Amino acid sequence: MISFVIPVYNEDESLAILHGEIVRHGEAAQQAFEIVFVDDGCTDRSWSTIRELARFDSRVKGIRFRRNFGKAAALSAGFAMARGEIIFTLDADLQDDPAETPKFLEALASGKDVVSGWKKIRHDPWHKTLPSRVFNGLVSWLTGVRLHDHNCGFKCYRSEVFKEVRLYGELHRFIPVLAAARGFRIGEVVVQHRARRFGNSKYGIRRFMKGFLDLLTVKFLTGFGQRPQHLLGSIGLVSFLVGNLGLLWLTATWVWRLWEPERFAPLHERALTIYSVAALLLGAQFMSIGFLAEMITASMGRDQDGFSIVEKIE
């Protein structure tokens, strides 16, 4: 069974066409499948179209949100409803071609757990492609998960990935990174990027800014989620060391000033005094926050292991 999870936000004109493409290619491959549409607070006739498709095709499922909660929430709801062992995600704007699903299945058969699409040739203006390339390069460099197109919505997963990867906020674009941190194997295939036929792009500068902040969150979660003190404590220790060095120098100059008072200004007139005390306080705060984070992590760890068990022999 294959599940297609499709978040929808004001895509009324394309839904019937997309449904027809998925059905045509799925039936030609003699593959059991289902389609899960998630209405993420649409204000057009998208939900009416989904209900109409479900009436005539029992393989169509639908979820409707009361308001727009974002793509990550829509995908999470769709994953919870999906019954397939393999889950595809694609956008509802017809820029992803369902005919390319065999490429993803071949990559899964080769041992991958997550396969991401790569729109090698894009039909978007430069003000979309340039920030996207910068963002993809930054994500690959910081996380070590080397993909050309982290933002591509056309992806394929084994269903067990979502038993361990939880989405919130806008972390949907980082699913391969989160999955890789849990030990899943990541792959990539080149896909066709079709020109937009209906609707408008949801891309904007705010998306790039929020994406960068989410990247920092993912880097922290994947790198230090089980050991936050390693990061926070390290910053605290460095700050504490800098503050102590500054105070040692001030102490030495204060003693020196007893013999040569004209050589150094009084301590209360020197900026280094303020900087040194601030560094000490900052270091103490970072280490305190690190200890609190460790206590929270240890408390949560009693209920949820921080590692993945693939198989047991007892």
Image: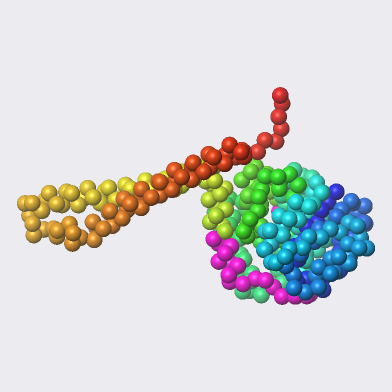
Residue 95 visible to an observer of this rendering: no
Q: Is residue 313 magenta?
A: no
Q: Is residue 186 above or below residue 15?
A: above
Residue at the front extreme?
66
Q: Which of the pair 151/45 is nearer the observer?
A: 45
Residue 53 quadrant: bottom right
Q: Quadrant of the C terminus?
A: top right
Magenta region: which residues? 188-213
Taking the spot 55% from the left edge, 52% from the top edge, the residue there is 219
Taking the spot 33% from the left edge, 48% from the top edge, the residue there is 240
Q: Is residue 312 left or right of residue 32?
A: left
Q: Which of the pair 29/302 is nearer the observer?
A: 302
Taking the spot 54% from the left edge, 60% from the top edge, the residue there is 213
Q: Which of the pair 137/280 is nearer the observer?
A: 280
Q: Is residue 198 magenta?
A: yes
Q: Is residue 21 left or right of residue 126?
A: right
Q: Is residue 184 above or below residue 60?
A: above
Residue 91 quadrant: bottom right
Residue at the left extreme?
259
Spot occupied by residue 303 in the image (x, y as percentages of width and height): 61, 38
Spot occupied by residue 289 in the image (x, y as percentages of width and height): 43, 48
Spot occupied by residue 307 in the image (x, y as percentages of width and height): 62, 38
Spot occupied by residue 273 in the image (x, y as percentages of width and height): 23, 56
